[in-house]
Image: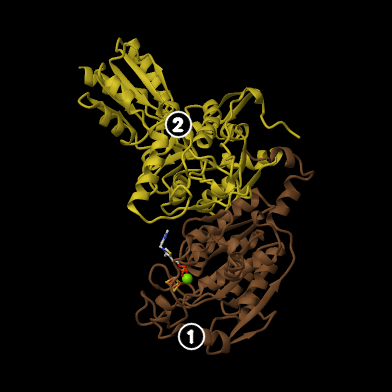
Chain colours: A brown, B yellow
């Protein structure tokens, strides 16, 4: 009986979670945990051995993802997950590299690294939890905060214009671009899996609520945000990236927008600089 | 395939010698960003690395360059970057990440005169304190100062060995003059070059703690994919690598980080004595300035002044005890450096009541030996 009980209680993703670090830091009603779960599901359903993965995060609530996954994982500095991951990928092209971080981390302080990794077609999967704000520091305006939205540093409303992230990714050279919300858990997991299993720079934006530091200020309860995710979104695969502004009044477009095959940064480097794959086996042995 | 080590006699500049030292040490990854006068290190690495199965990447800025070498280090490789003042400033936050995550890597700073853009093509030694304290928080760091192209080769190997042994970033604090000066550089046979690689863990993978000190206070370091499932964070962490926001764990972690350097000073600190035995005036110098200091010692001796030189090959950790011991028997110290008072302050701190002076320069040129002699003569008069 005892054995059965534990079998029932074990979460199907438990082997991918550092259970000794649970409870996690995310607030009740926060969407990050759902995005993280979809990411773990994607890893699991890919059937690739776990030690062929590594996860890199920057700093922020979303950036805590790397701390909970039970694979080699790195919680770096604010904005620098992508260059850290690029170092890993170029040194060990055989690894599957996943970057899990927030909108502030990846697109404000780390924006330059994002566009260059996309341009290089650095073979990695970037999952961006877009909660439209800097959650961790208390809800200041971000590069993704909608025009007129309130934040801790825009009391009367945001006077600036946010990024259209899929358009930015596409223009920079990303070869896979998709957007989901955390509510679309299955589509999201499948999309992350697809990104993992293809070559090239893959970008997946995930809209996710920060009820504590964004929702409250903008008079939006978590359930209302989820309702918008459900009712005011439309799945339109292949949509023109230029039409992907996040505007729930008009309806937010989700789906897979870009999926192009193009050689990756590490493949092209090897081809140009190690034409006979010289020395790879012997010289690249570590330690 | 070409040999990894270009054994033989070469006439090359300091930057190139540094790159050859890195190759000889087993460096397999370089993340760079061009900047005068360090560019030649990157250029040479871009040419050499592919021949030894290594990877060069020019990143989008120095923050990315520095961060990429940490990722590649955890992927299992010996890694390096090279820069000068403006890039060194940009790297500082990541230097702290390297220190706290105990990530071995080598960072070369071919110094030019600052502040800001300064004199891009002219040498200085104005980043010495930045090397010590440039990243926020309290930490220990290792920095070596080569005085010649030959030492750019030799000390780059030493830097890799120390970084691998102590799992810490190591700085090579060179300068434009040594970086761009061409001299004879002898590269020994590969098998005669002593290299050290990080200790890898053995034993039960589930019980492994990536920050639990072993011999020398340093933990073995696995590579990504070895199956140890490590978590690495810049947050204060316990020996398992997990964040713990407590005063106690902060203390434990800091004592470990400081201790692995402070408890191994004899192994880390390299100095060279020149005519010190009977000296009453001791010059303390490093890098290109030590060359000036040699000349000053010769000229002083010719004039009957008993002068000697303590050359710092390791500048950080600072050889405090050595200065304290010398202070017991000499009349005074003169620090020769191309700045207006950095290492001289350390000397003064350790010299106690013994007078201590600086023969400094605002940058862009070496300190003339005459400046040193003038100070010595005025002091003795
Ligand atoms: C260099 C640096 N600047 C600022 C901070 C403070 N900081 C921590 S998290 C964060 C914003 C994170 O926003 P985002 O990436 O959107 O993550 P979220 O918390 O919203 O998930 C900032 C500004 C920092 N840690 N480092
Ligand atoms: S502050 Fe916002 S983003 Fe951060 S954990 Fe709480 S709800 Fe989530
Ligand atoms: Mg955010």
Location of the N terminus of chain B by quadrant is top right
Q: Quadrant of residue A165?
A: bottom right
B42 with respect to B321 (left or right): right
Give the residue drawn at x 26%, y 31%. B349
Residue B133, placed above or below residue A115: above
Q: Chain of mark 2?
A: B
Furthest residue to the front? Answer: A1
Give the residue drawn at x 34%, y 49%. B248
Expressed as whole percent of the image width and height from the top left, the position of residue B311 reads 40, 24
Are discs 1 and 2 less than 8 Å apart at CB? no
Q: Which residue is mark 2?
A: B145
Expressed as whole percent of the image width and height from the top left, the position of residue A241 reads 64, 77
Q: Chain of mark 1?
A: A
- Dot 2 falls on a residue whose secondary structure is loop
Q: Cβ of disc 1 within 8 Å of ligand 2?
A: no
Location of the C terminus of chain B by quadrant is top left
Q: Quadrant of residue A274?
A: top right
- Dot 1 falls on a residue whose secondary structure is helix
| Residue in the foreground of this view, choosing between B153 and B246 | B246
Give the residue drawn at x 51%, y 75%. A31
Q: Which mark is residue A223?
A: 1
Which quadrant of the figure shows ligand 1?
bottom left
Expressed as whole percent of the image width and height from the top left, the position of residue B125 reads 40, 36
Q: Is residue A30 visible?
A: yes
| Residue in the foreground of this view, choosing between B190 and A209 | A209
B142 with respect to B150 (left or right): left
| Residue in the foreground of this view, choosing between B187 and B262 | B262
Q: Residues within 10 Å of mark 1 (few under 14, many from 20)?
A: few
Q: Is residue B32 visible?
A: no
Q: CA distance from mark 1 to mark 2?
A: 61 Å
Q: Residues within 10 Å of mark 2 (few under 14, many from 20)?
A: many
């Amino acid at each position: 009986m005892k054995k059965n009980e534990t079998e029932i209680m074990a979460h199907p993703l438990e082997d991918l979670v550092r259970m000794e670090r649970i409870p996690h830091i995310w607030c009740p009603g926060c969407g990050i945990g759902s995005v993280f779960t979809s990411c773990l599901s994607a890893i699991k359903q890919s059937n690739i051995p776990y030690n062929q993965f590594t996860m890199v995060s920057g700093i922020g609530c979303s950036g805590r993802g790397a701390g909970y996954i039970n694979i080699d994982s790195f919680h770096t500095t604010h904005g620098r997950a992508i260059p850290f991951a690029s170092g890993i990928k170029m040194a060990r092209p055989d690894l599957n590299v996943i970057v899990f971080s927030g909108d502030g981390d990846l697109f404000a302080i780390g924006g330059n690294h994002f566009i260059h990794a996309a341009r290089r077609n650095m073979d990695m999967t970037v999952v961006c939890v877009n909660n439209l704000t800097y959650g961790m520091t208390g809800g200041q305006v971000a590069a993704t905060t909608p025009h007129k939205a309130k934040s801790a540093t825009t009391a009367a409303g945001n006077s600036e214009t946010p990024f259209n992230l899929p358009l930015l990714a596409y223009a920079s050279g990303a070869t896979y671009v998709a957007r989901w919300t955390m509510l679309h858990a299955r589509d999201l997991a499948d999309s992350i899996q697809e990104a993992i299993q293809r070559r090239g720079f893959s970008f997946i934006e995930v809209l996710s609520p920060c009820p504590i530091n964004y929702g409250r200020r903008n008079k939006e309860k978590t359930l209302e945000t989820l309702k918008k995710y459900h009712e005011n979104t439309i799945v339109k695969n292949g949509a023109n990236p230029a039409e992907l502004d996040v505007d729930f009044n008009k309806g937010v477009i989700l789906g897979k927008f870009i999926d192009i095959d193009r050689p990756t940064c590490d493949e092209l480097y090897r081809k140009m600089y190690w034409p006979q794959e010289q020395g790879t086996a012997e010289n690249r042995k570590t330690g | 395939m070409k040999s990894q080590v270009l054994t033989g006699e070469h006439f090359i500049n300091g930057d190139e010698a540094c790159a050859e030292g890195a190759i000889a040490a087993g460096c397999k990854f370089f993340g760079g960003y061009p900047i005068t006068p360090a560019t030649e290190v990157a250029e040479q690495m871009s040419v050499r690395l592919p021949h030894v199965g290594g990877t060069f990447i020019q990143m989008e800025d120095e923050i990315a360059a520095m961060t990429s070498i940490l990722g590649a280090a955890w992927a299992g490789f010996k890694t390096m970057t090279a820069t000068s003042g403006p890039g060194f400033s940009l790297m500082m936050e990541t230097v702290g990440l390297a220190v706290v995550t105990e990530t071995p890597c080598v960072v070369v700073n071919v110094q030019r005169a600052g502040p800001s853009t300064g004199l891009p093509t002219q040498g200085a030694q104005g980043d010495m304190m930045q090397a010590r304290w440039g990243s926020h928080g309290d930490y220990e760091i290792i920095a070596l100062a080569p005085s010649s192209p030959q030492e750019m080769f030799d000390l780059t190997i030493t830097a890799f060995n120390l970084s691998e042994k102590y799992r810490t970033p190591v700085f090579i604090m060179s300068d434009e003059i040594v970086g761009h000066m061409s001299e004879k550089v002898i590269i020994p046979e590969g098998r005669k070059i002593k290299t050290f690689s990080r200790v890898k863990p053995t034993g039960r993978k589930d019980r492994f703690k990536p920050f639990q000190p072993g011999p020398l206070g340093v933990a073995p370091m696995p590579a990504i994919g070895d199956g140890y499932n490590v978590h690495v964070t810049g947050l204060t962490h316990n020996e398992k690598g997990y964040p713990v926001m407590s005063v106690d764990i902060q203390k434990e972690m800091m004592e470990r980080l400081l201790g692995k350097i402070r408890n191994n000073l004899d192994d880390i600190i390299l100095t060279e004595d020149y005519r010190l035995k009977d000296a009453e005036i001791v010059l303390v110098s490093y890098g290109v300035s030590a060359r000036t200091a040699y000349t000053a010692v010769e000229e002083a001796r010719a004039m009957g002044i008993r002068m000697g030189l303590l050359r710092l090959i390791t500048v950080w950790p600072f050889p405090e005890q050595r200065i304290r011991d010398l202070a017991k028997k000499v009349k005074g110290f003169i620090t020769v450096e191309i700045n207006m008072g950095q290492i001289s302050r350390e000397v003064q701190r350790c010299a106690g009541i013994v007078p201590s002076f600086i023969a400094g320069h605002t940058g862009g040129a070496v300190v003339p030996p005459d400046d040193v002699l003038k100070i010595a003569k005025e002091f003795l008069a």
